[in-house]
Amino acid sequence: AAVPSDSPTIFDKIINKEIPSNVVYEDDKVLAFRDIAPQAPTHILIIPKVKDGLTGLSKAEERHCEILGQLLYTAKLVAKQEGLEDGFRVVINDGPKGCQSVYHIHVHLIGGRQMNWPPG
Ligand code: 5GP
């Protein structure tokens, strides 16, 4: 867990290509890249290129509805691209109790193995 903040994060450096990442999808609004510490054979992070105050889902305002939809739709596109036709999981961790560590909203796309429920 990390202290919530609206400061720039490591994801800004990834967006600006100041640090390398393994990009699997990119358009003008959204970037998707492989998690550096994968929890499954496929573990991809999907983020907005412009944070616009969206440190986490709990900070969402009505103006964010379009980008929130784009993040989820990108998860679907990348799941297909990754061959996850038997299923996958999408997760947004929020805040300290949600185990959020990077305060730039991101959707985790996780798959390639059997998931468990409840997640714990
Ligand atoms: P959170 O815990 O905030 O939901 O997820 C943050 C994720 O970002 C973690 O799964 C972590 O492994 C990943 N991460 C942190 N730093 C980097 C990095 O520099 N590169 C990549 N590709 N992933 C990162």
Image (cartoon, helix red, strand yellow):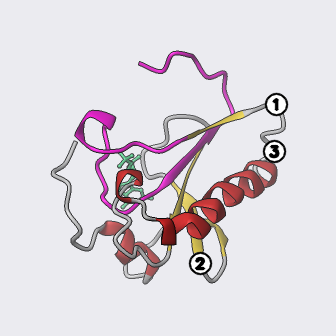
Quick one: SS at disc 3? loop
- Residue ID for mark 3: 83
Give residue 43's position: percent from left, percent from top. 56, 45
CA neighbours of label 3 inside 10 A, class few (<14), some (14 to 19), many (20+): few
Callout 1 amino acid: Asp
Please state which of residues 63 and 109 is positioned toward the viewer in this rendering: 63
Q: Mark 2 packing: few (<14 Cα in 10 Å), some, or many (20+)?
A: few
User: Disc 2 versus disc 3: distance between alpha carbons?
Assistant: 23 Å
Q: Which residue is drawn at 36% across and 76% down?
A: 13
Q: Nearer the viewer, mark 2 or mark 3?
A: 2
SS label for mark 2: loop
User: Which amino acid type is shown beneath numbered disc 2?
Assistant: Lys
Q: Element at badge 1?
A: loop
Magenta region? 91-120
Per the image, the residue denoted by label 1 is 86
Q: Mark 2 points at which residue?
A: 29
- Residue 78 at x, y = what percent? 72, 56
Image location (x, y in percent) of residue 62 = 49, 66
Q: Which of marks 2 and 3 is nearer the N terminus?
A: 2
